[in-house]
Structures are given as C-alpha cells and as structure tokens.
Image: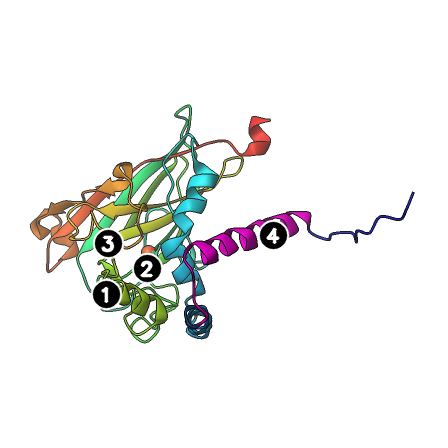
Amino acid sequence: MSAAKTVSIPNPRLNEVFDRLRTTLGKFIRENRISHEEYRSAVAFLTQVGQKNEVSLLFDVFLEVMVDEVDNNGRPGTITTIEGPFYVPDAPLMKSPCVLPHRPVEPGPVLFFSGTVRSLSGDTLGGAVVDLWQSDAQGCYSHFDILRVEAPYNLRARVVADDNGKFDVETRKPGPYEIPKAGPTGALLAAMGRHAWRPAHLHMKVECQGYRTLTTQLFMKNDPWIDSDVVVGAVKRALIVDPVGHDPAEMPQKNMPEPYYTLSYDFVLEPSIAETA
Ligand code: MBD
Ligand code: FE
C-alpha cells in the first residue's frame, strides 16, 4: 500500500469546477481555432474590463441570466430575474409609506409603487423588506454614474412593509438604461453591431424572515427596448408592468407639474430551505 499521491484539496468544488471550465474553454479554443492574436486581444479586453470596473457589468449582461435559471428554475412564488451590477447593500431602512431618497430636483414623473408581500398560501407577510434600487429618469444609477448622480443611495431604500405586508413608495419613473459606450462592455457590443440598451426597470430584493429572498425586476411595458433587452432573457412576461398615468389635478395637494403614475405589484415568497425541511 503506497502513500496516496494526492494533496488535500481545500476547496473540492472549486477544484472540480475550475477543471471543467478549463476543459470547456479548451474545447471552445480548438473548435473555433482561436489564434494567438485573438487570444491576446481577449486578454487585453479582460484587462480593460477590470481596469474600468466593468467585471460585474460584463458578466451580468452575458452570464447572470443562466445562473438565475439554474438557481431559480421551478421555484414557486414570484418569478425571479437577475440582480445586475448596480445593487448596493445597506440602503436606508424606511417604513412604508415612504418617499425614496432623491435629489432636491429629481427629474422625471412621480411613480407611486405599492403592493403586498405574501406567502405561497396567501398569508400577508407583515414586516417584509422590499429592498429597491433603480436608475433615475435619465438611466443613471447612484453610486455608479457618480458624475451624474452624486447623492448616495439616490432612489434606493429598504422599505419595510406594514403589518399587513403592504408597501407604498413614492419614487420616479426610471428611464431606459444604456451601457456606457466609453467602456469595454459598450465597445464589445458596438463591435458586434448590437445596441446597448435595457428597457426601463425597477430592481428589488424582497426578504422576510423564514422565506427565501426573491431577487427580481419589473419592466415598463411601453419602453422602446422592452422586446430587445441587451441582457437577453432577463425580461419575462410576468415581470412586465404598465404604470397607470394620472392627471396632476387628481392630486391637487401635491402640486405636481406633470402627470404622475401608479403601479401596483404583489410579491409571493416561498419558505426558506430550512422551513421546508
Ligand atoms: C443594468 O441596469 C442592469 O440591471 C443589468 C442587469 C445590466 C446592466 C445594467
Ligand atoms: Fe438595472
């Protein structure tokens, strides 16, 4: 009996998956006869992606849809979609009803977004947290488009639903988002002749003790990019919403200069793994 020639593997899953990744990429290189020049330009491209802070952007645009599929396929409750690159944890904790943090002059029409968080059996989940983030009306995200949105946590908050699981938030209608043309991800899309737009959307993580956190997005139906999201597969039918426009005269006390919108959407959470067991 000879001593085994193996070393103990600190992370067997990493070892196994990395090996398969290399095999898969090796197959890709052979099948596509990738030249040394192409290999070098790929390395240079990824170097740029890192230097310009676009690793999450690049991966989330092209790969996160598949991870969401693997992780969430067949899951009951509200349908999920990708988180994307612009989530920031620890946004201000606010009790519903509330107004999302915004600048003194926040562009775009007001949107009242409300709904109820429920369990699979329809029980309302009082105290559930709806962690919301979105672009502004010009398609810019706080913490990322810092030249255009300086205010930290602009249009971001963790909204605590009331005792009846109801949340009620005043925000702005988000605008469509375009991946910056100046960076490597935008350059890649341009080189492939593809546009770089996402339809206007709201992001949310809905959480409640004892339930599995739900990460999803709601997409604006009348957006020009609703059928051609650059993130192929992220838009799902059940996540398309159509905010109702209202005349400002319907709410004279708010003295609004332009039409405002209302949107109602309910979220359904499944029990966390521990609870099902
Ligand atoms: C976004 O706003 C976004 O949500 C995703 C997934 C990718 C790029 C920009
Ligand atoms: Fe987004």
- Of labels 4 and 2, earlier in sequence is 4
Quarter residue 60 falls in = bottom left
**Type of secondary structure dominating the magenta stretch:** helix
Q: Position of residue 194 (x, y in %)?
A: 24, 60
| Residue indicated by mark 4 | 19
Res 127 visible? no
The answer to whether 211 appears left or right of 100 in the picture is: right
Query: Ligand 2 appears in which quadrant?
Result: bottom left
Q: Mark 3 to mark 4: distance in Å? A: 39 Å
| Residue indicated by mark 1 | 106
How packed mark 2 is, by other alpha carbons closer than 10 Å (few <14, some 14-19, many 20 or more), is many
Residue that protrudes farthest toward the right in the picture:
1
Circle 2/circle 1 CB separation < 8 Å? yes
Quick one: quadrant of the N terminus?
Answer: top right
Cβ(mark 2) to ligand 2 < 8 Å?
A: no
- Of labels 3 and 4, earlier in sequence is 4
Tell me which amino acid carries mark 2: Leu
Q: Mark 2 to mark 1: distance in Å? A: 10 Å
Circle 3/circle 4 CB separation < 8 Å? no
Tell me which amino acid carries mark 3: Ala
Question: Mark 2 falls on what kind of element?
Answer: loop
